[in-house]
């Protein structure tokens, strides 16, 4: 339960397994790029990396809908309304699995068009990128299944279990990657198949754990239309955020691709490293959303304010530590992927700037977590839209001034605008809304 105890300790304790689980989940694509980069070719690495933000778009939708389910489950759990909890989890499962099936089909049949016409993948890597995209698309359904099961389990305060599931399946993914690439010489196809098998395993394990450990969550195939609308009310703004963020990254990928395969490979590597830097802070955001959901459901409004302040301080400390480490050891981290020459130089500059930018994201993300937890997920959509417009706008403007480095220099300018906007909204709107709820509860 996150409704008692010191807020920062509770948030951090809940977030730590999430951090480890998210790192393991990110390892699926990272291991793919490392293995093909070192044991196949730089073109293979660029091909796998070029699909990263298309995959990120669908994964973002998956996480958004799953988080929508988790928020309502956490609110019901905080209010001790177990009947609603049961109905919400079952309705959410049906909703997310149907969405996963449809998106998996959509991705399979449209990935070629998106690779060619949206992100403008260089012709020399197009066929390899398409092979990886098709296989990955099949595994999207399993990814949706795992994330909704994991989100429900975490909403009850159990964030450790999903970490263990991902630890097992990540090891399986690494072993299969190496086997398919080194022994069977399947290259891009091999790492795609390895990821698909690992995602299926993660979904299967998490499902059986959920129904055995928490019999209350055993699906009864009841679909409540009202609850589905509540889930969508929370999930759709987060889904829009996923579209905006990953759509922006796809456009940025297209801009990067315009500078050639060296930049394509570099962008895949540096963005992958940047995602790892963001994992702890994103985990605090997700922990904050569950914390906010439980406390909002329990009527602990004052505790929400304390939690936000302490989460911001934690994030700043984490950003300074991780950013400093990544800045110093950037050459070593980039070397893991096997890129060389100009691609290496691009990645080094990009990664070092990203390690500094991290502080900006750390400052505003706990407020986003609070907004999600209290049912104001639309704030995240607005934030993402502003960031999207800023990132693309600054990239296009700076391209004529500093050339290829516009790909990474656009980010800090966009995030500065977002930080200002988020806190203006927090102090002018969110605090007033929560204080009004506090007044009502006292009366």
Image: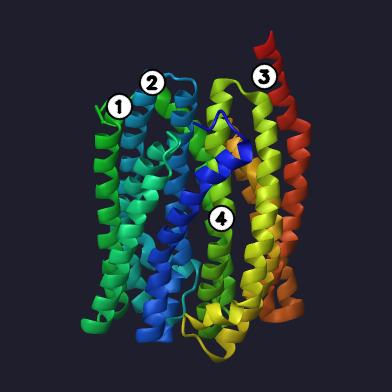
- Residue at x 76%, y 42% (from the top left corner): 423
Q: Are marks 3 and 1 in contact (CB under 8 Å)?
A: no
Q: Is residue 316 left or right of residue 5?
A: right
Q: Which residue is mark 2?
A: 82
Say what secondary structure mark 3 lies in. Answer: helix
Q: Which residue is mark 1?
A: 216
Say what secondary structure mark 1 lies in. Answer: helix
Determine the CA span between mark 4 and mark 2: 31 Å
Mark nearer the N terminus (4 vs 1)? 1
Say what secondary structure mark 2 lies in. Answer: helix
Q: From this viewpoint, is residue 137 visible?
A: no
Determine the CA span between mark 2 and mark 3: 23 Å
Label number found at residue 280: 4
Mark nearer the N terminus (3 vs 4)? 4
Determine the CA span between mark 4 and mark 1: 31 Å
Q: Quadrant of the C terminus?
A: top right
Q: Is residue 149 left or right of residue 364?
A: left
Q: Are marks 2 and 1 in contact (CB under 8 Å)?
A: yes
Q: Determine crowd level at label 4: few under 14, some 14-19, many 20+ residues with C-alpha closer than 10 A.
A: many
Q: Residue furthest top?
A: 443
Q: Quadrant of residue 110?
A: bottom left
Q: From this viewpoint, is residue 155 visible?
A: yes
Q: Are marks 4 and 1 in contact (CB under 8 Å)?
A: no
In the image, residue 216 lies at what x, y percent?
30, 26
Q: Which residue is mark 3?
A: 437
Q: Which mark's residue is nearer the viewer, 2 or 3? A: 2
């Amino acid at each position: 339960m996150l409704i008692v105890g010191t807020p920062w300790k509770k948030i951090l304790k809940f977030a730590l397994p999430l951090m480890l689980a998210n790192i393991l989940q990110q390892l699926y694509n990272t291991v793919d790029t490392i293995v093909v980069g070192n044991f196949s070719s730089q073109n293979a690495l660029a091909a796998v990396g070029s699909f990263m933000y298309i995959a990120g778009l669908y994964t973002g939708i998956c996480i958004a809908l799953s988080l929508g389910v988790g928020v309502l489950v956490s609110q019901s759990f905080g209010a001790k309304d177990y009947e609603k909890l049961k109905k919400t989890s079952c309705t959410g499962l049906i909703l997310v699995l149907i969405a996963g099936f449809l998106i998996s089909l959509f991705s399979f049949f449209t990935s070629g068009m998106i690779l060619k016409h949206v992100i403008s993948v260089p012709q020399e890597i197009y066929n390899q990128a398409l092979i990886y995209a098709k296989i990955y698309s099949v595994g999207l359904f399993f990814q949706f299944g795992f994330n909704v099961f994991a989100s429900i389990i975490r909403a009850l305060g159990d964030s450790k279990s999903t970490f263990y599931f991902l630890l097992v399946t990540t090891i399986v993914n690494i072993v299969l990657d190496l086997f398919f690439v080194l022994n069977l010489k399947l290259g891009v196809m091999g790492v795609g198949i390895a990821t698909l098998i690992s995602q299926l395993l993660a979904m299967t394990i998490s499902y059986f754990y959920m129904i055995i450990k928490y019999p209350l969550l055993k699906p009864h195939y009841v679909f409540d239309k009202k609850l589905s609308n509540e889930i969508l009310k929370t999930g759709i703004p987060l889904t829009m955020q996923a579209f905006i963020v990953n759509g922006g990254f796809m456009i940025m990928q297209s801009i990067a691709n315009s500078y050639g395969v060296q930049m394509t490979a570099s962008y895949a590597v540096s963005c992958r490293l940047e995602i790892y830097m963001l994992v702890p802070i994103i985990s605090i955001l997700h922990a904050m959303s569950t914390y906010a959901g439980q406390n909002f459901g329990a009527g602990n409004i004052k505790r929400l304010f304390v939690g936000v302040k302490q989460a911001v301080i934690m994030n700043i400390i984490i950003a300074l530590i991780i950013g400093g480490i990544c800045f110093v050891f950037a050459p070593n981290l980039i070397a893991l992927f096997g890129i060389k020459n100009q691609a290496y130089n691009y990645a080094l500059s990009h990664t070092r700037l990203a390690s500094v930018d991290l502080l900006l994201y750390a400052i505003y993300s706990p407020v986003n977590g609070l907004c999600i937890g209290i049912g104001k997920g639309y704030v995240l959509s607005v934030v993402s839209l502003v960031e999207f417009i800023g990132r693309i706008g600054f990239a296009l403007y700076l391209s004529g001034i500093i050339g290829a480095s516009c790909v990474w220099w656009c980010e800090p300018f966009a995030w500065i605008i977002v930080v200002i906007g988020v806190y203006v909204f927090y102090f002018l709107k969110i605090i007033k809304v929560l204080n009004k709820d506090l007044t009502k509860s006292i009366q």
